Amino acid sequence: MQGYNLFQLEKIGSILKKSFITLPDDQYIKDEKKFRKRRYSTGFIKNKQFLWSTTKENSFEQSETINKYAGNVKRDYEPLTKVVMSFIKKDFLPKVLVYLPPYDYEIGVHQIRVIADNQNMGIPAPEGIHQDGFDYISILSVNSQNLAGGVSVLLSSPDHKDVVFEQVLQPNNCLLLNDRSLFHYVSPIVPKLPGNCFRDMIITTFSIIDQNKQKHYNLQFDKISYKTVLLTLTRRSMRILRTALFGS
Ligand SMILES: [Fe+2]
């Protein structure tokens, strides 16, 4: 998948929506008002089987080159709750993996609520227009309330004029993007009507575990193509020979 894909997810129940209420504050937000809440867990897909990581360490780190806002900081988060883990494994990943090449992946799942009120806006992407250093990223909109702003933007380069996608994701929308070929950004959120607002998302990152596997698949494909061409040529030669010997 070179660019991006926008699709709908049907199974988002009220239990999943309610799980955002208990999200702890993201301690790594530098503003006094913690406008982001988050949980995070990791897993991996190997031979088409998904498993959650069993390691107790639950941290996330990006280099400063990639993330100027919170790079070079080891960020520890509370893990996802069982409800969210079950949704990811049973309802979410089977839908998303249809769109991705069939590799083994390391997966990071971020459950995030961004909030805002009359005095404080919420900033879903404090690092600005960026890439996150993975192969693919999915952005699933779970719920929102009294929301203005929060426009998801994809760009082919960090240049403002290279926008390839621009949309406020509605609940159940899932935007899947190639993090190597595209840059992304989300505009700040504010309340549409006076009061509070929130934007609830599940962001999943996919890193191909074995880069050589891509070459392996390409080689297999080449082998198949070679065999197919050889078989076609052999059949054609046989036909010509048969026609020459016995007539048509
Ligand atoms: Fe990002």
Image (cartoon, helix red, strand yellow):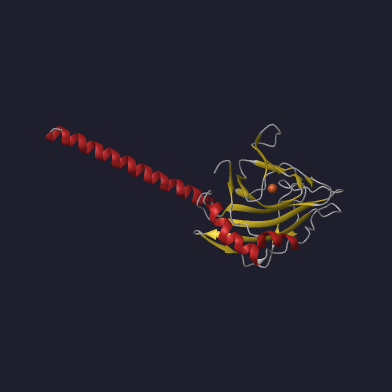
Quarter of the image with the N terminus is top right
Is 65 in front, or is 80? 80
Residue 141: x, y in percent? 66, 51
Q: Report x, y in % for residue 121.
A: 82, 47
Q: Residue at x 20, y 34 (%)?
A: 240
x then y, percent, for residue 12 = 62, 57
Q: Position of residue 77 (x, y in %)?
A: 73, 61
Instruction: Count numbered badges in the picture.
Output: 0
Locate residue 177: give its quadrant. Answer: top right
Residue 186 occupies quadrant:
top right
The answer to which of 193 and 165 lies nearer the viewer is: 193
Whether residue 154 can be seen here: no
Classify the position of the C terminus by image quarter: top left
Q: Is residue 35 above or below residue 181?
A: below
**Up-down relation of residue 92 to residue 128 (above or below):** below
Q: Quadrant of residue 79?
A: bottom right
| 22 left or right of 223 in image | right
Q: Is residue 187 left or right of residue 157?
A: right
